[in-house]
Each structure stands twice: as structure tokens, then as C-alpha cells.
Image (cartoon, coloured by chain):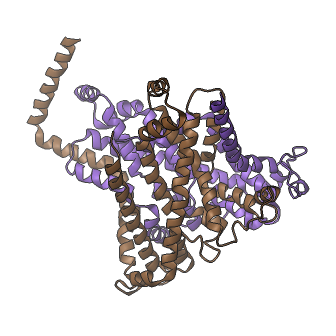
Amino acid sequence: MTRRLVQYLVLLVAAIAVVYPIAYTILASFMTPDESAQYPPKLFPSHPYLGSFRTVLDLVPLQTFLWNSFLISAAVMIGQVLTAGMAAYAFVYVAFRGKAFWFAAFISTMMIPWEVTIIPNYLTVKSWGWLDTYQGLTVPFLASGFGVFLLRQFFLQLPRELFEAARIDGCGHFRHFTIVVLPLSRPALASLAVYAFLGAWNMYLWPLLITNSDAKRTVQIGISMLQFQEVTVWNLVLAGVTLVLLPSLLLLALGLKQLVRGLTAGAVKG
Amino acid sequence: MNSTEAGLAVRRTDSQTRRARRMLPSLWKETAVGYLFIAPSLLLFAAFLFYPLLKSVYLSFYLTDPRGRVAEFVGLDNFTALFRSEAFWNSLLVTLKFTALTVPTGLLASLLLAALTYGKLRGMRAFRFVFSLPVALSVSTASVIWMMLYHPTTGTLNYFLTKLGLTPVQWLTDPAWALVSISIMTVWMNSGFQYIVLLSGLQGIADDIFDSARIDGSGPFRTFFQIIVPLVSPTVFFLSVVSVMNAFQSFGQMNILTKGGPAGSTEVFVYSIYKEAFVNYQFGTGSALSLVLFAMIMLLTLLQFRFERKVHYH
């Protein structure tokens, strides 16, 4: 019994420590400017005040930032699922010359840290006139070595008889890919989709380098700029963070299982 | 059942002989289809990974003008200048310290929380949700939140410290504290992901192992160290590789919270690259730095795999 008590006590303390920064952010964004500046600091707002949200939306185009981030993440997600799906299909079902070599080359891309290529990529994107454009933010990320690997492992588990049967029925590679393999691989595709979307949504260094107008800025850059614009008005910053945070928290609450699958996709041993 | 299988087998050999007869054209066609399918990925990798990697090597032998055009071949000078500069060794040391501060603590804490919440006890679903929460945060939202918490006068952390009768800390402006503060924030931020991965690793272990351990009278410490730790060690290994890589590639929290300061005490490797290339416009030395980072990450990953092969057995 005491053992249980200790367990719950430890968990409670840890839970408070983990939740406090988030709870503080959300609660303080409902305070009036006076309330949030009070000392000693209050935890709960006396009444829900929505003024900070209105002000922050007037000051900073958060909607645009959120929309940009959404567009970019969705494009990267679709792109990675498509390119990785096609490549993985070739590596599993098509017997072509040089397959082993290219597979090794694809796998080796996972070893190259993105930061190592960032200077030449910046110069490339700049020379193409892609600075501050959606192409610049998405195209470099449309392929993924990890995605190819993940999907290949899944395709390998699909029953081989289906492939033979489809071939005998005169089904070409393109139809076999779109009608048989893709529909059967929905769980793996979903995992990769979640993984790719999150990765793009959370990108920081690249959008920081190549965007310089509010029209193309992503939410990650927009949110970190709040602090420079409104240094003194803390609850405006917190209101901005809350607005950005709520959709992700909602998604987490609704889709924890899919998220877990997407996140642990990398942990699957091949 | 049997007859259809046999039928399938017959048809399979049939199709194989048929394929063998038209070997040449079909092989050519297969190769074309194969390259068609890998072409999109291949082109993107070529443009944004392989070419830049070679270009980095090329740039690292040159001095460049601020627009990124090569100005002068300098051989290995960029590298020797790096190894002679104090800033390089400082950022290497800061990165190593940051890794040591964040990876073991984060993994241990997450493993403990996963071990305490994995069962079917009352209220565990709520705890599991709470401990997964930080995964919803990105580097920038997490950094902005902690910037508020760390604020020397209006931040609530110092308020709690004074309440406990301790002296307030200059979290982000004291060179002795800045890296520790960033590490605390980073451990918090990464804990969600680590927790989720470890929890699903634990849930993959069959229940009867824990049941038989309990029947054998194994206490909580013995269960933790002799059953949980060895059984999830592949997951822990995977996480440690990923976390070390992440620590070596961290940038956002330093850029938002401290700008590498005070006195370079939080200037990690990627921040140095960023500063060299995109603040000072030295793309040559910046490339040299990024290649050193590449080499170090390779080396560390290799070491970790060596280490795993030595300690780990199924």
C-alpha cells in the first residue's frame, strides 16, 4: 500500500513539473495585462479575459503564419509519402540493374545531418530565386531516406502471392502500386505522414534562413519573433503561444495513438 | 486449399519460364520502370543532399565573398584556422557539455516515468497523457515559454526560489547557469518523445514476465533494474543514438533564449556554423565547421554501435 502511495506521489510531482509551463502559458494568456504583471504572480485569472488574443492577432498575422506552416507541412507530407512510396516499391518489387547500389545510397542519406548541407542549399535556393517562397520551403524536403526505408520494410511484409497473382492477371507495375500495394500499406503510410508533417511543422533553422517577409513566415519563426516586438507585454506573447499551442494539444488529445505510431516509426527495428 | 496452392505453384513456374524466354526486353523494361520509380527521390537527393555535401567539401577549401562566390583557394587553411581558434574548441566543449547534461538525465527520467505509468492502475491514462504533452511543443514555442519562466524579475521560477528561501538565479544571463537552464528546458521539451517511445517499448514486453517477477517476490527496484532496463535496452539504445544526434544538432533554443551567450557559454556547434555562415558570411569556414560536425556525428554514432554490440545481448 505504501509502495502505491509513493508511486502516486512521485507521479504527481512529476506531472505538476511537466504540466506547469504549459498550464502557466494558457492560464496567463487569459489574464488582463495588470493581472499578469502582478507580484506575487497569480496562477488563475480572476475572469477569462480575451483581449490579449484580439490584440496579438491585430499586431501579428498569426493566421498567415499558421496557414503557411500548414501548407508547407501538408506539401512535405504528401511529397514524402509519394516519393518514398514509389522508391520503396521499386526496391521491393522491381528487378532493375543497380538496385543494391541505389538502395545503399538512399540509406546513406539518413547519415547526413541536414546542417551539413545547409550552406550549399542556401546558396542554391538563393541562386534559383527561391528565397522567401513556398518552393524554397518545401522542395528540399520532398524526399526522405528514412521514409523509403520505413515503407520498404513494410512492403517486404506484404504477402508475395498478391504480387504474383496481380502479375499473372496482367497487372503492370503502376497499377499494382496504386491498386494493391498503396491501399494495403495504409498504416505505414499514415506513420510516415504523421512523422513528415510533424518534422516540417517544427522546422526552425531553414525557414529562419530563407524567409524574410510576414507573407511567407512559418509559425515557428513568427512565434519566436513575438518576444522582440512586444518585449514588455508578456501576456500578449503568452496569448500568441497559446493560440499556436492549442491546435497541437487538441491533435495530441484526439490522435495520440496515431501520433505514437508515427513517432515510434523510427524505433522499429528493420 | 492444397490444390489451389499447387495450381498457383504451377502457374508461378509457368510465368517464370515465360519470363525467362523474353528475358532481354523484360529486363530492360524492368530497369526503366525501376529508375522511373526511384527518379523523384533520386533527383531530390542529388540536388539537396549529395551535391551540397560535395559542395561543402569544395567550399571548405576556399575563401568566399559575402554572396557565396569562391574568391580564393586556401587549401586546408580554413581547417587549421578552425583548430587554432579558441571559439572552435569552446563550441565543441559546450556541445559536449550540453549532450552530457541532457541525454542521460532525460533518458533516465523518461524511463522512470514510463516504468511507473505503464501498468493498468487507476489514473494511469491521465498520467500517460500528461507525460506525452511536451511532444506537442516545438523548439520555438517551448523556448518562448521558458523565456517567460526564466525572466529574472517577472519569471515565476525565481518567485518559487525566493518562496523556498533560496536566492534568485540569473538563469539566462549568468555564464555559469545559462547552459544548465537551456539543458533543463531541453530535457523537458524532449521528455514527451522519449517517454512515448519508451512506453511503447515497455508495452511490447509481455505481461506474464512482470507477473512471474511479482510472484517470485521481485521488488520494485529489482524489477526496474533487472527486468525493465535489460528488456527495453534496444529502445534505450535507439533513443540514445537519436538524442545524442539531436543534442549535436540543437540550435533553436540557443538562438531564441541566449544567442549563444553570455560569453559564448551556450554557443553550440550548429550555432557557430550559423554565425560563421549567415552572420559573418564566411561560407568557406562555415563549410569546414559543418564538415567537422558531420565527422563527429559519424564517429559518435559508430562508437555507440560498437558499444551496443559489446554490452547488449538478447
Q: Position of residue A102 (x, y in %)?
A: 27, 53
Q: Quadrant of the N terminus of chain B?
A: top left
Residue at (63, 32) in percent of width and height:
A3
The brown chain is B
Residue at (41, 46) in percent of width and height:
A147
- The front one of B163 and B250 is B163
Above or below, A91 relative to A178: below
Residue at (40, 40) in percent of width and height:
A268
Task: Residue A29: tell me if it is visible.
Answer: no
Task: Residue B147: tell me if it is visible.
Answer: yes
| Apparent side of residue B290 relative to residue B12 in the rendered image (left or right) | right
Q: Position of residue B250 (x, y in %)?
A: 54, 62
Above or below, A120 relative to A247: below
| Colour chain A appears in | purple
| Apparent side of residue B65 relative to residue A9 in the rendered image (left or right) | left
- The front one of B209 and B93 is B209
Q: Position of residue A95 (x, y in %)?
A: 21, 42
- The front one of A176 and B4 is B4
Residue at (37, 87) in percent of width and height:
B74
Q: Quadrant of residue B133?
A: top right
Q: Quadrant of residue A14?
A: top right
Q: Position of residue B134 (x, y in %)?
A: 63, 47
